Amino acid sequence: MNCNICPRACNVDRNVTKGFCGMTNDIYAARAALHMWEEPCISGNNGSGAIFFSGCTLRCIFCQNYEIAAAQAGKKITVERLSDIFLELQDKCANNINLVTATHFVPQVAEALINAKNKGLVIPVVYNSSAYENVETLKMLDGLVDVYLPDMKYIDSSLSSEYSKAPDYAEVAKLAIHEMVRQTGKPEFFDAEDELVKSGRVEDGIMKKGVIVRHLVLPGTTKDSKAVIKYLLETYADDIYISIMSQYTPFDRLKDHPLLSRRITKREYDSVVDYAIECGISNGFIQERNVAQESFIPEFDYEGI
């Protein structure tokens, strides 16, 4: 069957050739390890069990994980091996299984999750996504994913076209996030009375179900950032959490770009956060600006694969 899993709808037979994502149907991943740098209710103290998949359905010119997004790194694994990785991360006391950029492998991931749950996987499953998703693809994960962690990168189609080669990004992401909220409902968190907390599987305060929408503030685009915040708050109010991120890191490949060659300023980030407060945000996360460092980008050294 030809592949139309993502909005690119490239309609190729990924059994024999690569799709727009840069991948065939073979699963490739570059790292599976405890990850400490997600939101506090995702990582906690023990870490999130993050699996970084190779390939991507976007072409973000500022991508922080370019090495794997461009399918330049990754090791081939089977569905059975992926199931085992989930269980191994659970055994390492991960607070959840964190599927990072798995869109183009959703059918295989769904099968691996079912297998792992049948073998004793009980910690929450987090789907960490660009939100450039087909609703029908997300429906394959209904009942398998507990927490959705999508981006909302842009509202302005000229930005999404230039920066991610996706002029339809906002339209697609709005529908995708709506489906994610439909599946999970309002945010819920583990407390001391939960059996998984009592058994030591999950830390108190970790998100049990719900949606956290991330927005990365980019240099020179605060107007669009505020449009993103406005849309999310007007549409979902406190039915979601919003994570306003300051960690944009400029790389040498963007040294000549008029905006993306620099970090965001304190004034830019503060203006977006202040706007969110003025709009009445009640569920949110902000970052310290010192996280905009390459040292916060994990090594894609096939650990845990």
Image (cartoon, rainbow, N blue to C red):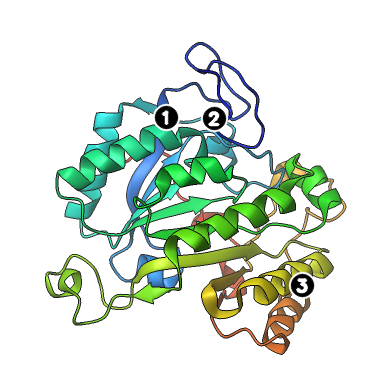
Check contact, mark 1 vs mark 3: CB within 8 A: no
The amino acid on which the numbered mark 1 sits, given as a three-letter code, is: Tyr
Does residue 176 appear left or right of residue 147 in this picture? right
Question: Which disc, if any, is residue 28?
Answer: 1
Real-space Cα separation, disc 1 to disc 3, in angstroms: 36 Å
Real-space Cα separation, disc 2 to disc 3, in angstroms: 32 Å
Position of the C terminus by quadrant: top left
The amino acid on which the numbered mark 3 sits, given as a three-letter code, is: Lys
Q: Position of residue 67 (x, y in %)?
A: 55, 37
Residue pictured at 39% horizontal, 28% vertical: 75
Q: Position of residue 44 (x, y in %)?
A: 34, 71
Closest to the observer, 303 or 242: 242
Q: Which numbered disc flags the more N-terminal residue, 1 or 2? A: 1
Which structural element holds mark 1?
strand
Check contact, mark 2 vs mark 3: CB within 8 A: no
Q: Mark 2 — residue? A: 71
Question: Picture quarter containing residue 210?
Answer: bottom left
Q: Which numbered disc flags the more N-terminal residue, 1 or 3? A: 1
Question: Which disc, if any, is residue 226?
Answer: 3
Does residue 173 appear left or right of residue 103 in this picture? right
Q: Which numbered disc flags the more N-terminal residue, 2 or 3? A: 2
Q: Could you classify mark 1 by the number of other residues whose Cα lies within 10 Å: few (under 14), some (14-19), or many (20 or more)?
A: many
Q: Is residue 242 above or below residue 261?
A: below
Which structural element holds mark 3?
helix
Residue sticking out furthest to the left: 199
Check contact, mark 1 vs mark 2: CB within 8 A: yes
Question: Picture quarter containing residue 268?
Answer: bottom right
Q: Could you classify mark 2 by the number of other residues whose Cα lies within 10 Å: few (under 14), some (14-19), or many (20 or more)?
A: some
Q: Could you classify mark 3 by the number of other residues whose Cα lies within 10 Å: few (under 14), some (14-19), or many (20 or more)?
A: many
Residue 37 visible, this angle: no
